[in-house]
Amino acid sequence: MKILRHEEFEEGCKATCNGPYDGKWSKTMVGFGPEDDHFVAELTYNYGVGEYRLGNDFLGLTLQSSQAVSNAKRLNWPLTQVEESLYMTEAPGGYRFYLIDKELPNCDPVQKVSLAVSDLPRSIHYWSALLGMKVIEKNEDKKIALMGFSDNQCKLELQDIGGAVDHGTAFGRIAFACPRDQLPDIEALMKKEKQKILTPLVSLDTPGKATVEVIILADPDGHEICFVGDEAFRQLSAVDPKGNKLLDEAMAADKSDEWFAKHNKQKASA
């Protein structure tokens, strides 16, 4: 993946983009291509937090790349073969990635994001009837549904785990861009259907960049969902050619570990 952009913030986000944490934080967008037509990961770093407790909510991200498999083998990164041409590995912190050992496709290599749910029919109803996703595949035996807004985008996989979904303290979120004028309609529908709205429609500022409008929802299992106005987001999400440089400079300037060590303290465990 490539570094697409990097941004630093001096205080917590009013839409809890960095989780429920105050203080300095940063976000780094990484992906195989621009956010307009690729699924990208937002890596959030809270300067004062040393570790997070993972829950069972995020089951993994699946991508197709024989290069990723060969990279892992070359670097002696632990790989577990799940089945033929499919490997599982863990990123630092424990997040799971599933690597399909095939050449990069012509579209986005990120195939699907897998989330745990406690009641599959209820979740399918929420994501399809309310949010407008279509059901692409459903496996009743494995209690899995594959869903998406379009055929050429990364898919959402919902897997029924037969119990409560625990989000830990890492506070992941999935985001979608849509026309700005649809945001009030989404908010009105959720109010009408008595669904949870975590952050009502609000404007978010990024220093030196576009101001975007977002609404943050929660599905029946508490998975956070962000809808962002597409027009301003296209400006905000443009690939920054200085992204790598800004990230390198921020990491070099980060003395938080040294500060905590000097004061004989440990970073907080979230």
Image: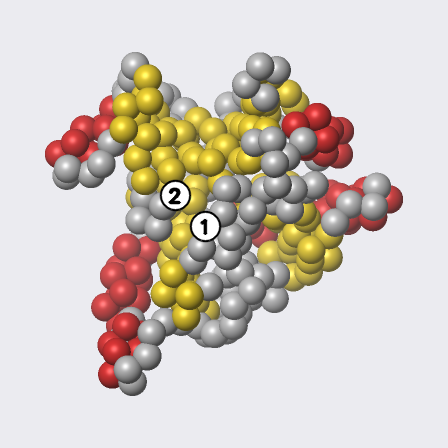
Of badges 2 and 1, nearer the viewer stands 1
Q: Position of residue 173 (x, y in %)?
A: 55, 48
Q: Position of residue 50 (x, y in %)?
A: 36, 65
**Residue most extreme to the right:** 192
Residue for point 23% across, 68% down: 252
In the rendered structure, find residue 25 and report the number of the disc placed on it: none
Q: Residues within 10 Å of mark 2 (few under 14, many from 20)?
A: few
Instruction: Mark 2 and mark 1 in contact? Answer it, CB < 8 Å.
Output: yes
Q: Is residue 103 left or right of 44 when viewed as pictured?
A: left
Q: Position of residue 207 (x, y in %)?
A: 49, 68
Residue wearing tag 2: 95
- Determine the secondary structure under disc 2: loop
Residue 53 seen in render: yes
Residue for point 50% across, 61% down: 18
Q: Is residue 43 left or right of 76 when viewed as pictured?
A: right
Residue 175 seen in render: no
Residue for point 60% across, 56% down: 212
Look at label 2 and name its amino acid.
Answer: Tyr
Residue wearing tag 1: 54
Q: Residues within 10 Å of mark 1 (few under 14, many from 20)?
A: some
Query: Where 169 sits versus 106, above or below?
Result: below
Q: How many marks?
A: 2
Look at label 1 and name its amino acid.
Answer: Leu
Position of the N terminus, as image quadrant, is top left
